[in-house]
């Protein structure tokens, strides 16, 4: 009983020391955390490691309704590292940002009870590119990549891969233009992972909505020896779609889809 009380005190202190507005220092860098609503202080939590967009910091995701609004309602611990000079080095293998993100995960696991089977990695825009880079070179323990409006070159050679990839992209993205295939193929944004997983033909799952003003067309590749891939396409531009992250977490966690 005394040991349990000690653990609760340590974890409660860790959460209070740096959460939401207060960054957690790590070396000469920092990250932000947001624990889910109603967490009992002992139950291991799934984790969403989220990389922010260009010229943002980790302070934004932990306050963002479409990111932390999704995690806090679903029992997921949100971790948001901050990039050097508010950007990410994802252009080539061996990124120091991948090393930093792994160090963040290690520290968080030492401070909070984490469900190691449910480590999810996400990112938006430049941060989506970084999320791809991270799982490409250090993603062996990642249960799913949730990528929003950003990819890497589909010719990349990845040393590791997550167990599952979920990508969303807007056809009218004017910031990071939709990555059509050489022949105009719509399914090219996830070509790298389809090849890595040995996927066959995709299956169109039709349209779905989290909100009435935006529809997604989903294609899935499930007959893959190495993993699962899904691609959601919408007619909009460069943004985090309302309800998209929450819907992915609901499906991954085996929960009834809800909004927000």
Image: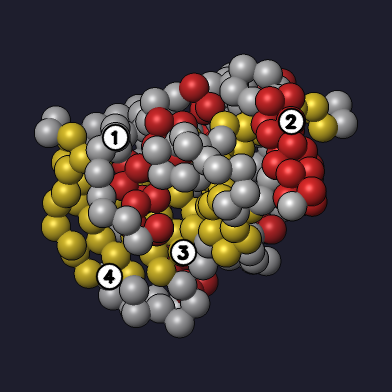
The answer for how far apart the CA atoms under marks 4 and 2 are is 47 Å
Q: Earlier in the sequence, mark 1 or mark 2?
A: 2
Where residue 114 appears, x then y in whole percent? 63, 53
Residue situated in front as seen by the camera: 41 or 104: 41
Q: Earlier in the sequence, mark 1 or mark 3?
A: 3
Question: Which residue position holds label 2?
Answer: 13
Question: Could you tell me which residue is drawn at 77 percent across and 38 percent down?
Answer: 10
Question: Which residue position holds label 1?
Answer: 260
Residue situated in front as seen by the camera: 44 or 116: 44
Where residue 232 appears, x then y in whole percent? 28, 50
Question: Which residue position holds label 3?
Answer: 164
Drawn side of residue 8 relative to residue 148, left or right: right
Frontmost of labels 1 and 3 is: 1
Q: Residue furthest front?
A: 1
Q: Earlier in the sequence, mark 3 or mark 4?
A: 3
Local packing at callout 2 (Cα closer than 10 Å; few below 14, some 14-19, many 20+) is few
Secondary structure of the residue carrying tag 3 is strand
Local packing at callout 3 (Cα closer than 10 Å; few below 14, some 14-19, many 20+) is many
Drawn side of residue 31 relative to residue 52, left or right: right
Frontmost of labels 3 and 4 is: 3
* Residue 182 in which image quadrant: bottom left
């Amino acid at each position: 009983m005394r040991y349990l009380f000690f653990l609760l005190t340590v974890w409660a202190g860790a959460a209070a020391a740096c959460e939401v507005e207060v960054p957690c220092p790590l070396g000469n860098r920092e990250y932000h955390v947001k624990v889910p609503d109603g967490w009992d202080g002992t139950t291991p939590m799934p984790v969403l490691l989220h990389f922010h967009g260009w010229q943002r910091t980790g302070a934004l995701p932990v306050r963002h309704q479409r990111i932390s609004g999704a995690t806090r309602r679903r029992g997921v611990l949100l971790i948001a590292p901050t990039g050097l000079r508010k950007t990410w080095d994802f252009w080539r293998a061996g990124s120091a940002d991948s090393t930093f993100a792994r160090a963040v995960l290690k520290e968080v696991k030492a401070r909070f009870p984490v469900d190691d089977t449910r480590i999810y990695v996400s990112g938006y825009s430049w941060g989506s590119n970084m999320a791809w880079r991270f799982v490409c070179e250090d993603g062996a323990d990642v249960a799913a990549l949730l990528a929003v409006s950003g990819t890497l070159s589909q010719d990349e050679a990845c040393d590791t891969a997550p167990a599952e990839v979920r990508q969303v992209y807007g056809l009218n993205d004017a910031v990071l233009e939709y990555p059509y295939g050489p022949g105009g193929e719509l399914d090219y944004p996830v070509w790298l992972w389809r090849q890595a997983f040995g996927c066959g033909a995709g299956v169109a799952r039709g349209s779905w909505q989290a909100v009435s003003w935006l529809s997604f067309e989903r294609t899935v590749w499930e007959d893959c020896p190495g993993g699962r891939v899904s691609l959601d396409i919408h007619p909009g531009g460069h943004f985090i779609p309302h309800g998209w992250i929450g819907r992915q977490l609901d499906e991954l966690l085996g929960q009834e889809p809800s909004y927000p």
